[in-house]
Image: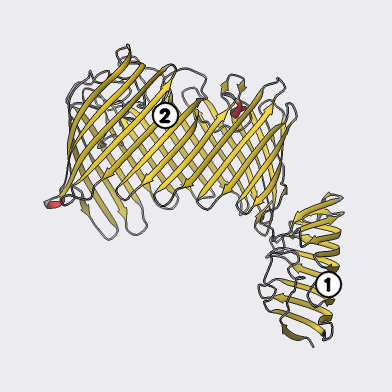
Amino acid sequence: MKKIYPLIFSSMACVAANAAPVDMSEPKTIIADKIEYDIKSESIQTSGQTEIINQSGQRMTLRDSYISKDGDALAGDDIKIWLGRHVYLDAESITRDGDLTVAHDATFTACDGCDPYGDAWIISATTVRHNMATRMLRFYNPVFWVYGVPALWFPIFEIPDPGVKHKTGFLMPDFESTNKMGTMINIPFYVYLSQTQDLTFTLAYLTQENPLFKLEHRLNAEHSQYRTRGSFTRNKDGENRWHIFNNDVIELGEYARATIFLERTSDKTYLQKYGFYNSQPYLDSGGRLELFGQSGYVVADAHVFQELRSTGGRYSTPSGDILPNIRGVYQTAPIYRETYLTFGADVLGISGSGTASQRVIGDARITSPWTLWGGNRITASMAARYDVYNFDHADMIDGETFTGLKNRFLPSGYLEWALPLYKPAAEWTQVLEPRARITAMTHTSKDQFALNNDSAGAFLSDLTLFSDKRFSGLDLWENGTYADYGVRWAAFNNINGNTFEVFLGQTYDFNNRADTDPNSGFHNGASDYVGRVGYNNMKWLDVSSRFRIDRTDFSLRHIETSGRIGTPGTYLSMGHIWSQRFIDAQTLGDDINEAMVGAGVKLSERWAIQWNGIYNLTERAFHSHTGGIFYTHPCYYMSAQYRRDNSIKDDYVGTTTFQFRFGMSIDGQQY
């Protein structure tokens, strides 16, 4: 008959020899056919089958064991130690002397009970040594078994024990093909520096090019976070090619934050050629300081750009470096009912290509919203803005180059009306909201003196209506009097959460516009019609579209659509943009017609395939597409992916690349 003795020892390190540290003063339970306690030596000896369980649930079974007073010495046969929920070490015999535990004819797995077909992987070895001081498991003559089939053999194999969260050493390598540089074998080496700091050094061996060196550093301080990654190679042509990306976020208290960012590369094609490219058109380096308050904020930015596009043309990014850009806004508490004041200031300096300009903008606005009888909402606003510019050999709109000071003054105001009409019901609640705004400004064209510094022009959409400004920046402004008007209908299902939305609107310019872009949607007088539609059933379907319709013949001029069908595992995502383009008011150019498609299929709980592609319908060719198959097991993970890139730029010619990754997982920790 077995006897159960709940005992308390100063140490029971045998249970935790290969697991996370535990409080050895907590109670332990020993179950055995026979337990003998030597009072003189304060040691324990068991006979027959023995089970030892500590309070945290760690468990060990063995036969004919001996445990010394302080747990430094242990011996037994047929030992099985559970080191985690699915992790155990099984051995014919085990001995412990101080920090060193030695198991003979042992097997180790982290897949106990993870798979109905058996353990996904097991490592068997003639001897396994665990050093509690270094927290390392060393296997001698190990054989790596996959579902009972021997797969790999090594003379010696070493891994951290499951209780180690961070350990310096090699990580699992991965393989990928490259852009005409052969196969790349990535061999990462992880370096643990402290609880808050580590780095990963990767040697990338290329079969047809010189090696590539990668480094990634991570640091988490108490009120800051630092991330740096970069790479370097000296290719066979003797060129030094490299990149460095850095992003640091520093909290300066409850109301301030600083950000430092750096993005630089040796040339325009390096990122793309070596697989670091994410379709970014340019790199941005600089810093940002943010100051917050309950009623205002100040943001100061500095940007230095590196252009990655090789062709000429007008881009939506500034043509020079921004040093500095400071924007501050302050909003008062209500001064009368809901009426409030807003004050803003903006400072911008742009330099590049032998030209420079600096501007200072100050603006003030009073806004007074009112809710009247019948639910009518009226908002009145008046504003004044004053600009001062200093130009140094800057190109002006009239084609001249100018150096000196210029200024301009812009008073404006708007009056807006809206009437939300609600129709509640048990199942559906509907909202019909007509809305109109008239904006008045001083009409002038001569003060539109500067070429685009921070403005990308105006593009009419449903987001443009009822906004304080139509341009994306501040250098160009709308002037004159114009009206925005539209109507929105929405329906909400109170039972299943389904939502519908439809909006249609238009703007009207009372003054003739200067140099109207035929693709903007704006015209003298009435503009094109803009709108959006959307539906979301909150389960498996979410689709939305915004569009622009010609004001004269109601033909479609622009449409952007996005949608997702399915569940998180099995889905079809779609995106499409089409825009009719005019070279001038009479000459039709090539349409913009591009589709983005993504699909995922969850084949089982562990197998999944995914595919994404960008297709240019005008050129009838893929810009790029990627796909892969993914397997996620509680004990390991693997993936095989490909990427096809059809872009051509300088020494880069797009091709198809492949990547294979494999990793192990021990009790939820990936290696």
- Up the image or down, 546 lies above or below 43; here it is above
> Marks 2 and 1: CB-CB under 8 Å?
no
Q: Quadrant of residue 30?
A: bottom right
**Residue type at the position of mark 1:** Ala
* Residue at horizontal 47 percent and vertical 32 percent from the top: 595
Q: Answer whether residue 377 is visible to the viewer in this image.
A: yes
Find disc 2 in the rendering and name its residue: 323
Q: CA distance from mark 2 to mark 1?
A: 68 Å
- Counting from the top left corner in percent of width and height, residue 40 is at 84, 85
Few, some or many residues within 10 Å of mark 2 (<14, 14–19, 20+): some
* Residue at horizontal 72 percent and vertical 26 percent from the top: 209
Residue at disc 1, secondary structure: strand
- Up the image or down, 32 lies above or below 286; here it is below
Find disc 1 in the rendering and name its residue: 73
**The one of 604 and 519 positioned closer to us in this rendering:** 519
* Residue at horizontal 45 percent and vertical 36 percent from the top: 575
